[in-house]
Image (spheres, rainbow, N blue to C red):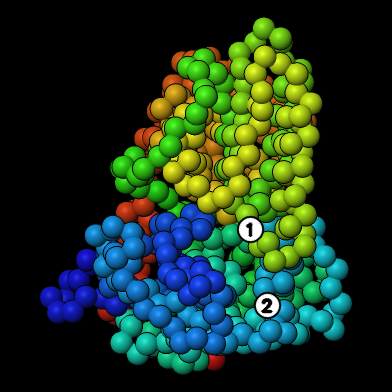
C-alpha cells in the first residue's frame, strides 16, 4: 500500500455502476466480472484501502450489503465491496436514457429522436439515481474518491456539494464524442455531464484524442481558463480540474495464471478468427459476421479450415433494441452455418454467455482477432489478446478503438468498420509474412510490460494522494 505517513492506510471510496460482485434475483452474491473495468479496478486495492460502492438492480429498496472481495475471488486483495440497493422509482427513465441515448452519443453513433421537452425528465432521473448511490457511498472517513462510468459524472458534483475538500478523481472509460454536436438535446446532455466532470480534481481519459475533444467542448460551452503543459488544467472561479491521459491496462502475469478452456475440435493448421464483445451496436459484431461470411464464400476449396469463434456477452437485454441485436446475431450465424457446404461444419461458433475461461482460451489460440468497433474507449480484450496469444496472432481493429493509440503500430487497422474495409484488412492479416507476425506480437507484449495494470493504478493513486497531502482542493467550489 502507498502509505508514507506511517500511520493508517489511505482510504479510497470507489463508485461504479457495476462491481466484481453481483447479487442475483434470489439475492445471492457471486463473482461477476462483467466488462473489463470490473477486472482491473481491484488493482487499486494493492495501493490503498478501498471501499467500493456499486448499484444493484435486482432487489431495489433493500439495504446495502457489504462483502469481502477476497472471499469471492481468491485474491490477496482485501477490501469491502458495498452493493448499493437504493430504491429507484419504477418510472425512472435513467436506464433507458443511458443505454439507448447516452451510450450512442458518447460513441458518435446514430441517436434516437427525443423531444426537447423530455430531456429534463431524463436528466432529473439520472441525477436522482446518483443521489441515491451517494447516500450509500458518502463516508466521512474516506480520504478521496475515485468515480468510474460516464453515468456517474453527476455524482462528482453531488459529492462536491457534500464535502468541499476531499479529492475526487473521475475516469471516463468511454470516448468523448469527436463529432460536432448540432443537435440541441445532445449538446445540453454533454453540458450536463461536463458540468459534473469539471467538479473533479482529476479527470482521466483513455486517449489524447478524448482529452482534446473534451477540452474543445468545454472551451466552446463554458467560461474557462486552459493551461496546457505536461498536465492540462481547466479552471474557473469555481473549479480547477487536471486532465490526464491514463489508458487502462492488464496484468499479463495474472492473466496467464487464470483458468482457461482451449477451443475444441481444432487442428494445428486450422485458421481461427476470434471476436469477443458485449452484444452492443458499438462493437460491430454484425460487421464481423458479414466480413467472415464473405471470406468463407470466396475461399478456395482446397484451403485450410477456417473458423470464427464469437464470444458474446448479452448486454442490456431489458431494452428492445439490444434484444433485436442479439437475435440478429444468432439468426445470421445460424443461417450461414445451415447453408455452408464443406467437408467440415459450423465454421461460425457462437458462445452467448459470460464465459471468461472460454474467451481466455480463444485468446491464447487465435490467428486473427477481430475488434472492428465503431468506437471504443479502450477495448481491453485487445490488450488481453496481446498478452496471452501463443501463435503470433494478428489483431485487426479500427481507428476509433482506443487501444490503437498505444498499440496500433503493431496491429492491422481497417480504414473503417464497414465490412468491405474489414475484408481488406483481414486479407492483409492472412497474408502477412510470418516474420512480420512474430515482430508485431513481440512488440505488443513489450508494450504491455512498459504500461501494465500496476502502472495504471499508480498513475491513478499518486495524484490523488498528492492532492490529499497538499490540500489543493481546500478552496470553495460552487
**Foreground: 296 or 239?**
296
- Residue visible at 66% across and 62% down in the picture: 316
Residue 348 lies left or right of residue 232; in this view the side is right
Residue farthest along the left direction in this orientation: 6
Secondary structure under the numbered disc 2 in the rendered image: helix
Name the residue beneath numbered marker 2. Answer: 94
Quadrant where the N terminus sits is bottom left
Q: Nearer the viewer, mark 1 or mark 2?
A: 1
Residue farthest along the front direction in this orientation: 26
- Give me the disc on residue 315: 1
Circle 1 packing at 10 Å, graded few (<14), some (14-19), many (20+), is some
**Foreground: 127 or 220?**
127
**Foreground: 343 or 35?**
343
- The answer to whether marks 1 and 2 mark residues whose Cβ atoms lie closer than 8 Å is no
Residue 52 % position (x, y): 39, 74
Q: Earlier in the sequence, mark 1 or mark 2?
A: 2
- Residue visible at 31% across and 42% down in the picture: 257
Residue 370 % position (x, y): 61, 35
Residue 469 lies left or right of residue 227; in this view the side is left
Residue 163, image quadrant: bottom left
Judge whether residue 88 can be spotted in this image.
Answer: yes
| Marks 1/2: CA–CA distance | 16 Å
Residue 187, image quadrant: bottom right
Q: Is residue 384 above or below residue 182?
A: above
Residue farthest along the top direction in this orientation: 302
Query: Total marks drawn?
Result: 2
Q: Is residue 128 above or below residue 258?
A: below
Amino acid at each position: 500500500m502507498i502509505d508514507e505517513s506511517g500511520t493508517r492506510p489511505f482510504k479510497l471510496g470507489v463508485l461504479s455502476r457495476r462491481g466484481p460482485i453481483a447479487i442475483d434475483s434470489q439475492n445471492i452474491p457471486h463473482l461477476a466480472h462483467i466488462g473489463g473495468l470490473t477486472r482491473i479496478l481491484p488493482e487499486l486495492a494493492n495501493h490503498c484501502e478501498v471501499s467500493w460502492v456499486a448499484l444493484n438492480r435486482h432487489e431495489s429498496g433493500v439495504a446495502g450489503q457489504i462483502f469481502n472481495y477476497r472471499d469471492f475471488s481468491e485474491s490477496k486483495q482485501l477490501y469491502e465491496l458495498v452493493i448499493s440497493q437504493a430504491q429507484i422509482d419504477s418510472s425512472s427513465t435513467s436506464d433507458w436514457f443511458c443505454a439507448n441515448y447516452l451510450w450512442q452519443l458518447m460513441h458518435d453513433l446514430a441517436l434516437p429522436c427525443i423531444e426537447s421537452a423530455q430531456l429534463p425528465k431524463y436528466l432529473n432521473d439520472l441525477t436522482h439515481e446518483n443521489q441515491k448511490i451517494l447516500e450509500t457511498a458518502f463516508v466521512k472517513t474516506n480520504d478521496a474518491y475515485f468515480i468510474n462510468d460516464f453515468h456517474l459524472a453527476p455524482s462528482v458534483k453531488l459529492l462536491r456539494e457534500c464535502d468541499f475538500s476531499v479529492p475526487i478523481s473521475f475516469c471516463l472509460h468511454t470516448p468523448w464524442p469527436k463529432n460536432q454536436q448540432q443537435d440541441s438535446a445532445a449538446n445540453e446532455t454533454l453540458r450536463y455531464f461536463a458540468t459534473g466532470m469539471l467538479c473533479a480534481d482529476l479527470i482521466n481519459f483513455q486517449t489524447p484524442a478524448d482529452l482534446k475533444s473534451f477540452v474543445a467542448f468545454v472551451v466552446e460551452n463554458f467560461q474557462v481558463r486552459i493551461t496546457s503543459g505536461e498536465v492540462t488544467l481547466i479552471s474557473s472561479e469555481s473549479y480547477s480540474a487536471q486532465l490526464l491521459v491514463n489508458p487502462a491496462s492488464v496484468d499479463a502475469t495474472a492473466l496467464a495464471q487464470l483458468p482457461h478452456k482451449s477451443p475444441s475440435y481444432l487442428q494445428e493448421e486450422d485458421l481461427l478468427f476470434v471476436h469477443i464483445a458485449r452484444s452492443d451496436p458499438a462493437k460491430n459484431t454484425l460487421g464481423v459476421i458479414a466480413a467472415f461470411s464473405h471470406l468463407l464464400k470466396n475461399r478456395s476449396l482446397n484451403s485450410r479450415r477456417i473458423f470464427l469463434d464469437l464470444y458474446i456477452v448479452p448486454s442490456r437485454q431489458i431494452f428492445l433494441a439490444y434484444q433485436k441485436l442479439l437475435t440478429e446475431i444468432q439468426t445470421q450465424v445460424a443461417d450461414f452455418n445451415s447453408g455452408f457446404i464443406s467437408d467440415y461444419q459450423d465454421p461460425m461458433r457462437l458462445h452467448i454467455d459470460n464465459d471468461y475461461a472460454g474467451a481466455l482460451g480463444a485468446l491464447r489460440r487465435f490467428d486473427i482477432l477481430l475488434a472492428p468497433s465503431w468506437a471504443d474507449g479502450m477495448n481491453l480484450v485487445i490488450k488481453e489478446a496481446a498478452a496471452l496469444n501463443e501463435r503470433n496472432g494478428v489483431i485487426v481493429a479500427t481507428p476509433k478503438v482506443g487501444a490503437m493509440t498505444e498499440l496500433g503500430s503493431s496491429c492491422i487497422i481497417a480504414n473503417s468498420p464497414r465490412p468491405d474495409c474489414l475484408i481488406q484488412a483481414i486479407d492483409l492479416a492472412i497474408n502477412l509474412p510470418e516474420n512480420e507476425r512474430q515482430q508485431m506480437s513481440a512488440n505488443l507484449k513489450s508494450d504491455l510490460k512498459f504500461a501494465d495494470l500496476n502502472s495504471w493504478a499508480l498513475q491513478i493513486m499518486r495524484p490523488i494522494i498528492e492532492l490529499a497531502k497538499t490540500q489543493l482542493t481546500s478552496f470553495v467550489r460552487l
